[in-house]
Image (cartoon, grey):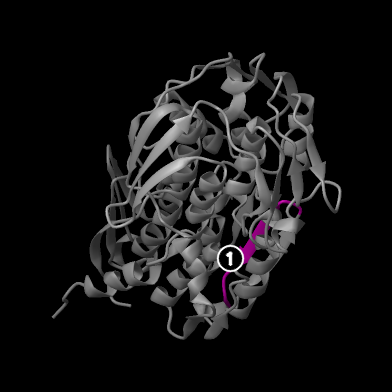
Amino acid sequence: MDAFRATVSLPGSKSLTNRALLLAALAEGDSTLTGVLFSDDTRVMLNALRKLGIKLEVNEDLCIVRVSGRGGTFDAQPEPLHLGNAGTAYRFLTAACCLADGPTTLDGIPRMRERPIGQLVDPLRELGGQVEYLDKEGYPPLRVLGGGLRGGEVTLQPTLSSQYISALLQVGGYCAEGLTLHFEGPVTSRPYVEMTLALMERFAVEAQVGPNFTRIDIAPQKFGGIGYAVEPDASNATYFLAAGAVVPGSVCTVEGLGFHSVQGDVWFAEVLQQMGASAVYEPDSITVMAPPNGERLRGIDVDLNAMPDTAQTLAVLALFADGQTTMRGIGNLRVKETDRLEALRVELTKLGATVAIDGDSLIIDPPVDSRITPTAIDTYDDHRMAMSFAVAGLAAPGVTINDPGCVNKTFPDFFDRLNDLRKAVVDSS
């Protein structure tokens, strides 16, 4: 693809949309959410909240949802809630259904039944929640008996997912004795926990964070409805910023995200800077420019524990970099929509890279003589596999994506937006 100069506006954040929907449902009174993302994962949350007795007024054309909160109560659901492969919805609703007035069963697709949830169920039980495994110990499906949460103090070891922590925090105000989380060791994907706390603050939930993030205290409290504008999705922005970095001579600006964002993935542009691209942060925009004078990106050694959803984007850029790229702290990719470490190893190898998995790290050597092998990329029903490898298709001919429709999980019109970059090619005549 030739050099392009583009400014893009992206749909709302899945992470923020699902958090805002649940917090609005928990609040007393009405909330109006704008900029809402409508995708497979957020529709799972919307449908589940309806079945749990939450009144919703939805305008997809305007990306608005009005939520009538019920102050921390839900209706028991006699039929199982089928939550697909929406990990955020499954984990958040597991905690929320502890507040229901009776039992609810939560299930999903076969892959969801392979994704561990014991690190959420165990602390919920300590807090007085009644949660049963219906099949394999430690994995969905679950039966949550409801009846409320006593609350109290829980000590957490490092978890596989920050979503377990966020699930606990969002119901903390409705624990009869409040909630105190103690952390022994680093918090996995801490920016996502900080995002949850920032959004809770918008809903007037008071949480006290201890020194060095060693504990979080939430007193018993109810919170009220608000108006809230959902930010664009910072994880999805990485594909466009990466395109600006990897296509020589290109410049890409993402609007609506900048250093004021509550999403940790906005700092992916700093990773691109380490690789030799240029990045400019404004309060509400990020601009990335490819390395000057047609230079190639360079391989780096980076810990992505704080932003694991950017790992696949960086892995694809490693194909086009000079030297080895090592990504550390990404072991939790094994329990995502697919085993992303193994999926990356297989697909990057098909393109000519040499790839090794070493514990929680992925080590990538680019193809010899920078020659990308044309191939069809399998996506494993994983939206981020499709979107990240589509960036390779911009920078090298012959890369095709199998099952592109899997992007509906978080970004239904992704390929239309990506094709807009081709319309922004700079006329060099």
Residue at image x 64%, y 30%? Answer: 99
Residue at image x 67%, y 58%? Answer: 108
Residue at image x 63%, y 16%? Answer: 178
Is residue 420 shown in magenta?
A: no
Q: Amino acid at mark 1?
A: Asp
* SS label for mark 1: loop
Q: Quadrant of residue 163?
A: top right
The magenta stretch spans which residues? 359-367
What quarter of the picture does the C terminus occupy? Answer: bottom left
Q: Is residue 321 visible?
A: no
Is residue 261 rendered to the left or right of residue 79? left
Label 1: which residue? 382
Q: Quadrant of residue 417?
A: bottom left
Q: Nearer the viewer, residue 383 or 318?
A: 383
Q: Position of residue 327 (x, y in %)?
A: 61, 53
Is residue 361 shown in magenta?
A: yes
